[in-house]
Amino acid sequence: MSSAIRARQLALGLPEAVEKPHFHKASFRVSNRIFATLDEQKNVLVVKLKPADHASSIESQPEIFHSVGWEHQGWTGIHLAQISSAQLQAMIVLAWKNVAPKRAVRAYEENL
């Protein structure tokens, strides 16, 4: 349903988002804080959620979301082949909001 190309487009479409390497993956950052990483070989995006959102996502849709370690920090894997573009966008925006400066989040929400 979704692809690494689409995930990259969505992540980089957010205010102040930049792409930088992170080990063997691409990372997407705002104010130098990672909100997502992309493993193109595995077709998996990992996003920074709140721990409660991590747990509820995996519980409600285990075919899409999975644990990747660091659950206590909310890091959540997404099987890109299983998620719709709209749901992927919502998860990337949520991850971005979790780490972006408050002024950037306010500006983003004012422009919706």
Image (tube, helix red, strand yellow):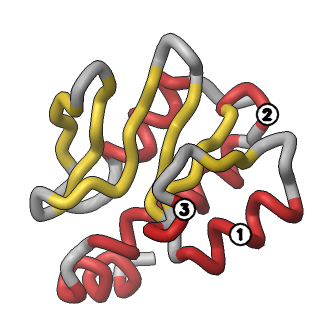
Whole-percent x, y for residue 57 in the image? 75, 63
Q: CA distance from mark 2 to mark 1?
A: 18 Å
Q: Residues within 10 Å of mark 1 (few under 14, many from 20)?
A: some
Q: Residues within 10 Å of mark 2 (few under 14, many from 20)?
A: some
Can residue 96 be seen here? The reply is: yes
Query: What residue is shown at x 75% (from left), y 40% (from top)?
Result: 83
Q: Secondary structure at mark 1?
A: helix
The amino acid on which the numbered mark 3 sits, given as a three-letter code, is Glu
Q: Quadrant of residue 8?
A: top left
Query: What residue is shown at x 44% (from left), y 44% (from top)?
Result: 10
* Circle 2 residue: 82
Counting residues from the N terminus, which is met first, the one under dot 3 or under dot 1? 1
Query: What residue is shown at x 23% (from left), y 26% (from top)?
Result: 23
| Callout 3–callout 1 Cβ contact below 8 Å | yes
Camera-nearest label, 2 or 1: 1
* Circle 1 residue: 55
Q: Among all residues in the image, which is located at the extreme top?
A: 41
* Circle 3 residue: 71
User: In the image, is residue 35 above or below residue 13?
Assistant: below
Whole-percent x, y for residue 26 in the image? 29, 29
Q: Secondary structure at mark 3?
A: helix
The amino acid on which the numbered mark 1 sits, given as a three-letter code, is Ala
